[in-house]
């Protein structure tokens, strides 16, 4: 057998079956972006590989899956922190977006966020923001795997505003063109992103549901994030946001909903029966005082759950290592004694279970024969990750993200030994500085 790329892995965590087993001194053989061999290392395998990485001192695991983010919001990082959700969103973020989000903002923001994601070992991003054609093009260039959700809401988006009155009128045709353009791309796929139940009327949500079926794309939405959202839905519609989505026909295996903090027992039942998936965003929920999503109850009910960072304006970084660490601790804090979420649970949400929640479980989320080669490796020669008794514990509670040494997505190397191989980091930093100077004038 010959391989395009061979990897010798010192500690290999495949996440196969979500089990968390660790094997030492293993070989991974990759051809045409596909994992075709995983076996104990032998020197003959090295000779059969066109390119070979000796990662015998590293921890090797599946690339991490960031299931909910708004990539370009990295350019708002640090803007009006420390405000509660309603005030933060309606008084600061939405008005600033209206003033400042243009195509160049998305090009620079998505580039910076792609760089950060790669640096932290993330190989899949589930993005929801504006100017999706531009975001998709940057993500294709970055080498990352992504779903890019076209925004739907009751008011015009920054992109539509930039196109004059025709913008919002052409929303559906522009969305369809976007879907057709990227329909067959092997890594970057379109999705539809109704912003949230509170920003979409019943008609908008019905239209989204029909379009998702027509274009065969997943729906990515924010759901029941804050107590205010929940209470206002009861007042306005006489039902919870989740019940409303159910009654409009949106709860299905095609839906992935971010946050899901405020859920009644009936909501959990409806969600469970629908096959829809959830995304836990612990950093953002804590920072915006949204509350704690009852993740253990959701998983016990059999609801698929993934993990996300949310946008950098409410986190403030895109590190899935941070999300795993905070995610477990928030559940322990909320659940009291008798831990409800441990290291293996967190890793599962970021790999195996996360992939299944996104409908990608047959392609990514584990390192095993037949899966796409989305693989990362981490240094072990740093003081805060020694001694190495438990790879699982160390990954979730000690690693922070910058220990990432190698990032491979679809068999291509995106980052290796402190070098970005698909993006020009210095050019992106210069563009970011230009954007910072421009944005400051809009504050
Ligand atoms: Zn979000």
Image (tube, grey):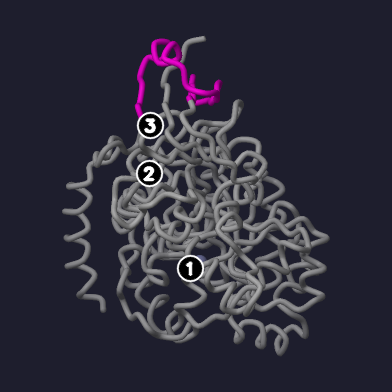
Label at residue 326: 1
Quadrant in the rendering for residue 76: bottom left
Choose between 266 and 199: the one closer to the eye: 266
Q: Residue at the far bottom: name it.
A: 235
Relative height, residue 379 to residue 246 (above, below)? above
Q: Main secondary structure of the magenta part?
A: strand
Marks 3 and 1, the one that precedes in the sequence: 3
Quadrant in the rendering for residue 113: bottom left
**Which residues make up the magenta segment?**
27-56
Label at residue 56: 3
Image location of residue 15, percent across then percent down: 59, 42
Image location of residue 161, percent across then percent down: 41, 65
The answer for how far apart the CA atoms under marks 3 and 1 are is: 29 Å
SS category of the residue bearing label 3? strand
Label at residue 378: 2
SS category of the residue bearing label 1? helix
Choose between 186 and 155: the one closer to the eye: 186
Whether residue 126 is visible here, answered yes or no, is no
The answer for how far apart the CA atoms under marks 3 and 2 are is: 11 Å
From the viewer's perspective, is 135 left or right of 263? left
Quadrant in the rendering for residue 304: bottom right
Residue 397, magenta (yes or no): no
Residue mark closest to the camera, 3 vs 1: 3
Marks 3 and 2, the one that precedes in the sequence: 3
- Label 1 crowding class (10 Å Cα cut-off): few <14, some 14-19, many 20+? some
């Amino acid at each position: 057998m010959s391989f395009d790329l061979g990897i010798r892995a010192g500690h290999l965590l495949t996440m196969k079956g979500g089990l968390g087993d660790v094997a030492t001194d293993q070989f991974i053989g990759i051809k045409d972006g596909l994992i075709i061999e995983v076996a104990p290392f032998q020197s003959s395998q090295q000779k059969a590989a066109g390119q070979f990485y000796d990662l015998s001192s590293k921890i090797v695991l599946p690339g991490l899956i960031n299931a909910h983010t708004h990539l370009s919001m990295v350019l708002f990082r640090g803007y009006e922190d420390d405000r509660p959700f309603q005030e933060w969103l309606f008084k600061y973020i939405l008005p600033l977006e209206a003033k400042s989000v243009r195509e160049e903002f998305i090009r620079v923001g998505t580039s910076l966020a792609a760089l950060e994601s790669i640096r932290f070992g993330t190989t899949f991003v589930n993005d929801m923001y504006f100017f999706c054609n531009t975001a998709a093009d940057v993500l294709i260039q970055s080498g990352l795997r992504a779903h890019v959700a076209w925004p739907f809401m009751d008011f015009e988006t920054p992109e539509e505003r930039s196109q004059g009155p025709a913008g919002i009128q052409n929303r559906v045709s522009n969305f369809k063109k976007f879907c057709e353009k990227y329909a067959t791309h092997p890594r970057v796929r379109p999705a539809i992103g109704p912003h949230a139940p509170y920003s979409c009327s019943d008609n908008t949500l019905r239209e989204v549901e029909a379009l998702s079926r027509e274009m065969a794309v997943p729906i990515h939405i924010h759901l029941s994030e804050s107590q205010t959202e929940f209470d206002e839905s009861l007042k306005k519609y006489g039902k919870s946001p989740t019940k409303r989505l159910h009654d409009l026909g949106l709860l299905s295996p095609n839906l992935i909903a971010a946050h899901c903090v405020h859920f009644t027992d009936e909501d959990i039942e409806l969600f469970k029966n629908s096959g829809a998936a959830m995304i836990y965003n612990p950093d953002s929920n804590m920072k915006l005082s949204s509350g704690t999503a009852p993740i253990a109850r959701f998983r016990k009910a059999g609801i698929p759950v993934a993990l996300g960072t949310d946008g950098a304006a409410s986190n403030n970084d895109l590190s899935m290592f941070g999300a795993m660490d905070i995610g477990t601790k928030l559940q322990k804090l909320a659940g009291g004694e008798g831990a409800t979420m441990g290291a293996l649970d967190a890793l599962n949400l970021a790999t195996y279970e996360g992939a299944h929640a996104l409908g990608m479980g047959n392609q990514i989320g584990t390192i095993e024969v037949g899966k796409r080669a989305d693989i990362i490796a981490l240094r072990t020669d740093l003081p805060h990750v020694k001694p190495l008794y438990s790879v699982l514990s160390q990954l979730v509670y000690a690693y922070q993200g910058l220990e990432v040494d190698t990032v491979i997505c679809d068999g291509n190397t995106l980052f290796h030994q402190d070098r970005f191989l698909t993006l020009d980091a210095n050019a992106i930093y210069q563009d970011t500085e230009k954007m910072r100077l421009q944005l400051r004038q809009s504050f």
